Amino acid sequence: MKFFLDTANIAEIEEAASWGVLAGVTTNPTLYAREGGKLADFHKHLKRICDIVDGPVSGETVCLKRDEIVREGEELAALAPNLVVKVPTMPEGLAATKALADKGIKVNMTLCFTVPQAILAARSGAAYVSPFVGRFDDISEDGIDQLEQVVVALNNYDFGHQVEVIAASIRSANHVTKAALMGADIATVPFGVLEKLVKHPLTDRGLESFLADWEKVKNA
Ligand code: G3P
């Protein structure tokens, strides 16, 4: 499993990159707004993220009509070679994905919740499909079960191009564990979840005990 950060926060991206574990970033307008981002600076901000990250950076389109999505997607893709255009799962999005893929521009199809949506995304040419986990949990359904169905279904077929599953809307270490066990290619996680993945109370206790023993050795 590869780890992407689901953020628009530069400090978080730089920190995760310094750990050597950052394989990519996904962003969306909500995350950008959370950083106090201004529309006029959106492309500049994405370019800055692309320069930091050694891997794909998904930047979401905000248009709803296919021609507008394609135009915006082309603008985004021109920012950096590692920019992936994030497009919502909808008929206009499928049409735009086909057009962008035909131009050699990679698409991450987002807001994907079902197996048919994921297969349609892959058929239209998406290089990445992002099934959402947490938002199913939010409506008292099993997001992990839905993700597993998508992983199994996509593995049943050859789409003629590489399609990677990004487990998205990840809220916990348990989500990541389950996604890894089922073989999801990528998990995109908020920085807070990434921090939790590194930690375990037994690791902390072991470290405390090593340090206490080391003090004894030093003072012996
Ligand atoms: O990439 C967007 C996705 O991860 C959204 O997550 O927590 O808003 O459902 P969330």
Image (cartoon, rainbow, N blue to C red):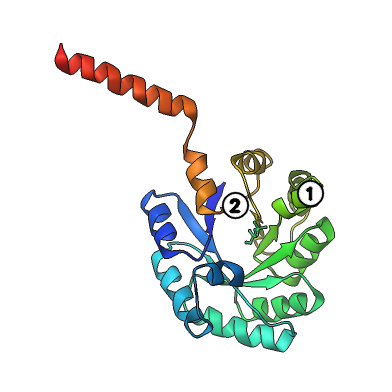
**Residue 215: where, in percent of width, then height?**
22, 19
| Res. 142 image quadrant | top right
| Res. 58 image quadrant | bottom right
Q: What element carries label 1?
A: helix
Q: Which of 200 and 116 is in front in this view?
A: 200
**Residue 102: where, in percent of width, then height?**
67, 79
Q: Which of 45 and 129 is in front in this view?
A: 45
Q: What residue type is labelled 1?
A: Gln
Name which residue lies at 57% across and 52% down.
Answer: 189
Residue 133 seen from this side: no
Crowd band around label 1 with a 10 angstrom C-alpha radius: few (<14), some (14–19), many (20+): some
Name which residue lies at 45% across and 75% down.
Answer: 45
Q: Is mark 2 on a helix, strand or loop?
A: strand
- Name the residue at the right extreme: 116
Name which residue lies at 28% across and 16% down.
Answer: 213
Residue position marked by numbered label 1 in the rendering: 146
**Residue 16: where, in percent of width, then height?**
42, 53
Residue position marked by numbered label 2 in the rendering: 186
Name which residue lies at 64% across and 61% down.
Answer: 162
Q: Does 42 appear above or below 143?
A: below
Who comes first in sequence, dot 1 or dot 2? 1
Q: Which of 184 and 211 is in front in this view?
A: 211
Q: Does the residue labelled 2 lie within 8 Å of ligand 1?
A: no
- Marks 1 and 2, how far apart in space? 16 Å
Q: What residue type is labelled 2?
A: Ile
